[in-house]
Amino acid sequence: MSGLRGAFAAGRFAVTAEIGPPRGADAEAITRKADHLRGWVDAANITDNQGANVRMSSLAGSLLAQRAGVEPVMQLTCRDRNRMALQSDLLAAGALGIPNVLLLTGDHPRFGDHPEAKPVFDLDGVQLVWTARTLRDDGVLMSGKAVSPRPAWLIGTVENPFAPPLAFRARRLAKKVAAGAEFVQTQYVFDFEVFERWMASLRDLGVTEHCKIIAGVGPIRSLRALDFMRTAVPGVHVPDELDRRLRGVPAGRVEEEGIEVCVEAVQRLTTIPGVAGVHLMALGFEHGVPDILRRAGIPRPPTVLPDHNRHHPMEGIGHAR
């Protein structure tokens, strides 16, 4: 079986990546990024106005990625939609054959390019997971009205093992899993001591028996990026030893050292019980993803969509399954 569901079913170490939709109506921007990832990842997240900045919609980006031969994970945030719009987009994803959805609360608009925008947050991430599970498994909207046919996507969520209070993080994910989450993607993992304690707590709670844990990784390719990670990305903890390692190499070697750190992280994560895969966040560096996975020794997915099966972005839009 191919794709994310197939990786989980087969017990393979899964790999997901990210595709950030463009700030513009350029369908080929998605295709160009997908070209680098096709055949190397099980699926790719299509972000939903990441950082609260306006981009092409995740729904459109997911459809374009799918037609470029990369299985999408459609992100859906509570920031911009009320419960009616959220359920509508979930149904649309099901109708268009999008196989995975990732449900999250979302960044507040004040952090983005429209700080004056009114936030919605009619639901939070846990409530949205519950809503999606009820819609799929019971065929019922929040209003109680039935829907037919039911969507069939895999339900994902996010979690940050490094956000305080640390002791609460495992139980917070357990709450999302109880609501219906089947896989989780984490924030960047740089601090393995904290991450491994979190994983032990998840195993003790039985969470890993019901939810696939996909650990977030990514290359730090410059000292500027390092400073940004340390000071401007909420919940990311860059240990002092990593900071010293990247600052201790010649300027011309920082990028290569950052990539090597990422390779080592992927390799280490394969050894931690309960970790089902990695989520490789390399926005703007999609072309480097194959090299990272190759160097880490991660085998390619067993089924690769041939290039001749790709379609024009708008081909057959009225006939999506």
Image (cartoon, rainbow, N blue to C red):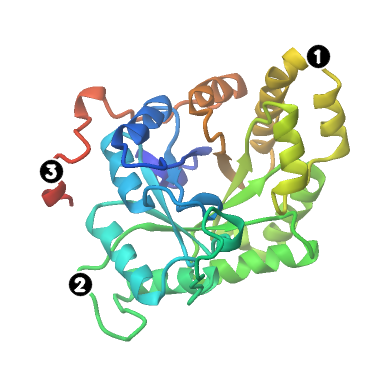
Dot 2 or dot 3: first in sequence order is 2
Q: Are marks 2 and 3 in contact (CB under 8 Å)?
A: no
Q: What element carries label 1?
A: loop
In terms of depth relative to the viewer, which is nearer, 321 or 237? 237
- The label on residue 148 is 2
Q: Characterize the local packing of mark 1: few (<14), some (14-19) or many (20 or more) Cα atoms within 10 angstroms.
A: few
Q: Where residue 167 sits in the image (x, y, percent)?
A: 79, 65
- The label on residue 250 is 1
Q: In this view, does 241 lie above or below 159?
A: above
Using the numbered discs, state the Cα–Cα distance from disc 1 to disc 3 in whole angstroms.
52 Å
Please say whether residue 191 is visible from this viewpoint: no
Q: In which quarter of the image is residue 260?
A: top right
Residue position for label 3: 316
Q: Characterize the local packing of mark 2: few (<14), some (14-19) or many (20 or more) Cα atoms within 10 angstroms.
A: few
Using the numbered discs, state the Cα–Cα distance from disc 2 to disc 3 in whole angstroms.
23 Å
Q: Which residue is drawn at 87% across and 37% down?
A: 240
Q: Which residue is drawn at 43% across and 37% down?
A: 42
Q: Where residue 236 sits in the image (x, y, percent)?
A: 73, 48
Q: What element carries label 3?
A: loop
Q: In which quarter of the image is residue 141?
A: bottom left
Amino acid type of disc 1? Pro
Residue 243 placement, left or right of 77: right
Q: In which quarter of the image is residue 246?
A: top right
Q: Is mark 2 on a helix, strand or loop?
A: loop
- The label on residue 283 is none
Amino acid type of disc 3? Gly
